[in-house]
């Protein structure tokens, strides 16, 4: 017998008004259950997923280029291209001269104008109206519309009003096709568009492909879907494109967001499970002679309780043949480098190698200098390898890495170039790891083919638990929240207005006269350019111009140095060396100093145009001062009214990075928090919104854990479609299993 639920396509409207299947708190349209004597007469249609692979038919070459830009190539791509929001259609009476608008109207009369001269485009003119007024709509080069749009037809038109009661139509669709055929005000789906194709054109294409929604595959097992009280994926996509009730789109988005979060958590958990099964990493379980001596004699301060706990945990994990994979999050100034150096020295004292990879040359150079200082008198072979390393020096470093003569190396992407090989890499540290792509991180983790290294990821950006679960759900985390003893919190002062600016510079000069040092941070390198090479905005300060202004103004008589990312490596090294040695009292810089800069004599920082930076970045910048025992102060200077900024007030009110990260997540949302999205399927969220979907994320994690616990390879029949969806969505990142 035919299953009752397959008696009609899910997209057909209810056979009887008001027939709905209640799913959770929302009612989604479903089919009427047929009686036994009706079944044989019903027209059946089984889903055909191959239809989703059919190429899109663009209305023009220009539209085809626009679709290509949006990466919409197939019908399935189009149906998964979700509206960004919905917008009210304009009224006819409300149209202004020259206004581009979308209107929902009814045809009163329509006719074609005959073509009398060669080269003239045939015109179709229609009188159309809505509840507010009547106007003349003109269609170009489409004479067949007279037959297609007879009087009484409801249309959705997009075009330009001429201010004289006329409307030049550029795109149009039957209102019935897109769910706007009823009278009254209408909400129209608004899609992310591109040059060559408009939102209305995309809506029309979606309407033409509406029938293919019945072919969308349902990846969730029925028991899971019903247990979570979720609609089918077909119903959810239908409601996203063509909502019939006010709250349908919100609940449909929840279903699609759940799918996205579930798949991401399955990726993470399968990756973690696969790693749990891995063996062959170097077993670093020998006597801790070098590390014990280093911790007791060479370290210039007493480790915090957090540092000691992290060191003990890493020591235990390094002593097994299962490759360690940890994320070390640290409060600003909490001593992440000390913990990372301990792990690397465990490799060194076993006669093996360790590497630290940083995203920029400046940060790599600072790590190199910090490690040299922390090592003290310990005779460890250490080298720096970046893109600016001279050819002769580079050849020497590569030779020693390949032979095993070099125990420890610090570098940039240069460490993962094809000609770099390690004799016996045991520990890999990746700093600011969110700035690297998945494959870049994996390249350093390969080590020698038969022996994967232990890996420690580090970030100076404290990550809220919600975001950590969404972005790094496969990694175990360690958090350093304590500051070293004797390091007081940095005072943060908002500066808005000329009088406050003068007070800030007076305080800065006082610190310099006491023999201390200062940073002045600007968002731009040069006044002529913004951060992307375009013309700068008025009032935005640039480091090069600010250096000259300060030399003849507020800081006349003091020694100033310039540092920015556009300088040559040797120039940057010279500037940093002068500042670190105390020869320069003030460093005028861009955000190149955001992480890794450790100058104990620096106690004051003034950040220009602070309103242009994010919370996390400002917190990292202010962490560069007050590292030598004297209390630091950070001035956040902005235009009038900057003191009322929620972001800047959060900086003034919160000293802790973990608390600020929660504020930042709520103010800026998940996609912007880390500045640069990760590469890979699990690193990007298209539908889910954090922290708004925190509860949904927790549900998805629980479901993923339950699935993996009973079927880690997703080989059970009920998980087959879920496995297909997992692999289809992860083409840019390998999935274990």
Image (cartoon, grey):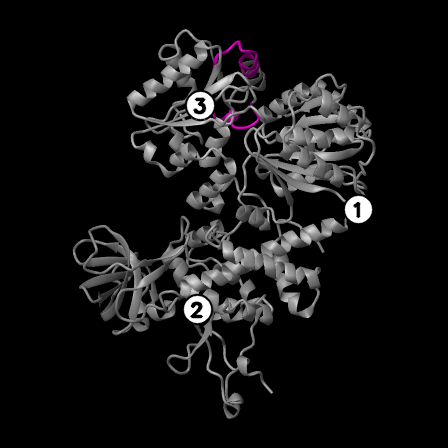
For the C terminus, the image quarter is bottom right
Q: Is residue 639 above or below residue 329?
A: above
Q: Earlier in the sequence, mark 3 or mark 1?
A: 1
Q: Residues within 10 Å of mark 1 (few under 14, many from 20)?
A: some
Q: Is residue 711 visible?
A: no
Q: Nearer the viewer, residue 296 or 658?
A: 296
Q: Residues within 10 Å of mark 3 (few under 14, many from 20)?
A: many
Q: Nearer the viewer, residue 513 or 23?
A: 513
Q: Which mark is residue 633?
A: 3
Q: Earlier in the sequence, mark 2 or mark 3?
A: 2
Q: Position of residue 235 (x, y in %)?
A: 47, 69
Q: Is residue 152 left or right of residue 676?
A: left
Q: Earlier in the sequence, mark 2 or mark 1?
A: 2
**Eye-nearest disc, 3 or 1:** 3
The stretch drawn in magenta includes residue 453: no
Q: Position of residue 733 (x, y in %)?
A: 64, 49
At mark 1, the secondary structure is loop
Q: Which mark is residue 25?
A: 2
At mark 2, the secondary structure is loop
Q: Nearer the viewer, residue 659 or 445?
A: 659
**Eye-nearest disc, 2 or 3:** 3
Q: Is residue 69 visible?
A: yes
Q: CA distance from mark 2 to mark 1?
A: 48 Å
User: What stretch of residues is rendered in magenta?
Assistant: 576-597
The stretch drawn in magenta includes residue 581: yes
Q: Is residue 391 above or below residue 150?
A: above
Residue at 54 percent across and 20 percent down: it is 629
Q: Which mark is residue 279?
A: 1
């Amino acid at each position: 017998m035919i299953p009752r639920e397959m008696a009609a396509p899910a997209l057909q409207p209810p056979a009887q008004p008001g027939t709905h299947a209640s799913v959770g708190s929302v009612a989604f349209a479903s089919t009427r259950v047929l009686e036994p004597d009706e079944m044989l007469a019903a027209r059946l249609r089984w889903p055909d997923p191959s239809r989703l692979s059919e190429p899109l038919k663009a209305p023009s070459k220009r539209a085809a280029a626009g679709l290509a830009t949006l990466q919409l190539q197939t019908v399935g791509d189009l149906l998964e291209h979700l509206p960004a929001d919905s917008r009210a259609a304009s009224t006819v009476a409300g149209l202004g001269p020259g206004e581009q608008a979308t209107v929902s109207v009814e045809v009163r009369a329509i006719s074609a104008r005959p073509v009398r001269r060669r080269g003239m485009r045939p015109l179709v003119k229609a009188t159309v109206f809505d509840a507010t007024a009547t106007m003349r709509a003109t269609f170009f080069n489409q004479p067949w519309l007279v037959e297609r749009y007879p009087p009484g037809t409801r249309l959705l038109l997009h075009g330009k009003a001429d201010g004289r009661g006329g409307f030049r139509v550029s795109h149009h669709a039957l209102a019935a096709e897109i769910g706007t055929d009823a009278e009254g005000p209408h909400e129209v789906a608004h899609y992310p568009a591109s040059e060559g194709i408009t939102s209305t054109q995309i809506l029309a294409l979606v309407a033409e492909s509406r029938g293919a929604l019945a072919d969308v595959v349902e990846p969730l097992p029925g028991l899971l879907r019903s247990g979570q009280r979720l609609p089918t994926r077909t119903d959810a996509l239908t409601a996203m494109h063509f909502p019939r009730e006010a709250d349908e789109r919100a609940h449909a988005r929840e279903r699609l967001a759940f799918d996205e979060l579930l798949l991401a958590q399955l990726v993470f958990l399968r990756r973690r499970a696969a790693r749990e099964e891995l063996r062959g990493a170097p077993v670093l379980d020998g006597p801790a002679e070098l590390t014990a001596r280093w911790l007791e004699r060479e370290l210039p301060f007493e480790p915090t309780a957090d540092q000691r706990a992290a060191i003990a945990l890493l020591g235990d994990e390094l002593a097994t043949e299962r490759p360690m994979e940890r994320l070390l999050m640290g409060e600003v100034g909490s001593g992440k480098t000390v913990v990372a150096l301990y792990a690397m020295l465990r490799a060194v004292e076993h006669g093996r190698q360790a590497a630290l990879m940083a995203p920029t040359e400046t940060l790599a150079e600072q790590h190199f200098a910090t490690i040299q200082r922390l090592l003290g008198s310990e005779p460890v072979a250490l080298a720096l390898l970046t893109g600016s390393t001279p050819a002769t020096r580079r050849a020497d470093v590569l030779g020693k890495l390949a032979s095993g003569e070099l125990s420890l190396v610090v570098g940039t992407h240069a460490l993962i170039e094809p000609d770099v090989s390690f004799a016996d890499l045991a520990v890999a540290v990746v700093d600011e790891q969110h700035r690297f792509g998945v494959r870049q991180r994996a390249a350093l983790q390969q080590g020698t083919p038969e022996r994967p290294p232990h890996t420690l990821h580090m970030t100076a950006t404290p990550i809220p638990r919600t975001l950590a679960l969404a972005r790094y759900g496969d990694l175990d985390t360690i958090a350093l929240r304590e500051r070293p003893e004797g390091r007081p919190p940095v005072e943060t002062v908002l500066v808005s207005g000329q009088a406050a600016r003068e007070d800030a510079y007076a305080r800065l000069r006082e610190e310099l006269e006491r023999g201390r040092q200062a940073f002045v941070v600007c968002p731009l390198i040069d006044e002529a350019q913004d951060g992307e090479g375009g013309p700068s905005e008025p009032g935005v300060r640039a480091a090069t111009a600010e250096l000259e202004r300060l030399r003849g103004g507020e800081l006349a008589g003091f020694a100033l140095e310039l540092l920015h990312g556009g300088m040559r490596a040797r120039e940057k090294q010279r500037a940093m060396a002068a500042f670190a040695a105390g020869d320069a009292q003030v460093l005028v810089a861009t955000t190149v100093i955001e992480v890794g800069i450790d100058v104990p004599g620096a106690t004051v920082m003034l950040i220009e145009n602070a309103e242009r930076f994010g919370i996390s970045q400002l917190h990292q910048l202010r962490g560069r001062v007050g590292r030598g025992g004297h209390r630091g102060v950070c001035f956040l200077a902005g235009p009038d009214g900057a003191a009322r900024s929620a972001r800047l007030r959060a900086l003034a009110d919160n000293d802790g990075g973990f608390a600020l990260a929660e504020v930042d997540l709520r103010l800026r949302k998940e996609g912007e928090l880390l500045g640069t999205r990760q590469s890979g399927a699990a690193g990007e969220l298209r539908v889910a919104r954090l922290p708004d979907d925190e509860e949904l994320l927790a549900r998805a994690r629980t479901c993923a854990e339950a699935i993996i616990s009973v079927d880690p390879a997703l080989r059970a029949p009920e998980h087959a479609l879920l496995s297909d969806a997992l692999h289809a969505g992860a083409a840019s990142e390998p999935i274990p299993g």
